[in-house]
Image: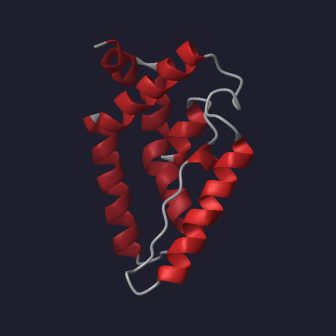
Amino acid sequence: MKKVLAEVGIKPERFGLQWASAAEAPRFVKLITDFTLKTKELGPIGQAEGLSPEELKLRIDKALALVSDRKLRVALGNATKTIRKEANFTQEFITSVIEDKLGKTITAGLEGGGAEAAAKK
């Protein structure tokens, strides 16, 4: 998701995904507080990126179309299989697999017909 946001010109720091179990209330509070502070520092979405509301909507529509596309979901499934097979769950390895398996699909989807055509529907 962060790669998709970066590719459409939205600060990837606007997305966060963390794990906290029900037994980790203090961790959960810290995660939410930190993320809230970070998004406040970034400023309003679009404005902080220097985008007009119309351009922001266009870019969000492109990103939504891309992440809804079957090709990207298949590529993500293949990346997940590779990560599980290698049993290497380091951030560096996951990032490299995601780039390898999804990078071209994301770029092609944003430049070509996939996401663009879906965004026009």
Q: Give x and y (percent) for residue 50.
A: 71, 23
Q: Is residue 65 above or below residue 90?
A: above
Q: Is residue 116 left or right of residue 48?
A: left
In this rendering, is residue 101 above or below 56? below
Q: Is residue 57 visible?
A: yes
**Nearer to me, 68 or 57:** 57
Which is nearer the eye, 115 or 58? 58
State the image coordinates of residue 20 (x, y, percent, origin top left): 45, 76
Q: Residue at position x 34%, y 40% from top?
A: 72
Task: Please indicate whether residue 86 sits to the left or right of residue 18 in the image.
Answer: left
Front-most of residues 60 and 110:
60
108 vs 105: above or below: above
Residue at x-position 64% and y-position 40%? 11
Q: Position of residue 19 (x, y in %)?
A: 45, 72
Asked if one can make out residue 90 in the rendered structure from this viewpoint, the answer is no
Q: How is the image coloured?
A: secondary structure
Who's the residue at 70% across and 39% down the image? 43
Tally of numbered tags: 0
Quarter that holds the C terminus: top left
Q: Residue furthest bottom?
A: 23
- Point out residue 115 in the picture as x, y percentages from the top left corner: 38, 24
Left or right: 7 in relation to 60: right
Residue 79, by quadrant, is bottom left
Q: Is residue 89 left or right of residue 119?
A: right
74 shown above or below 18: above
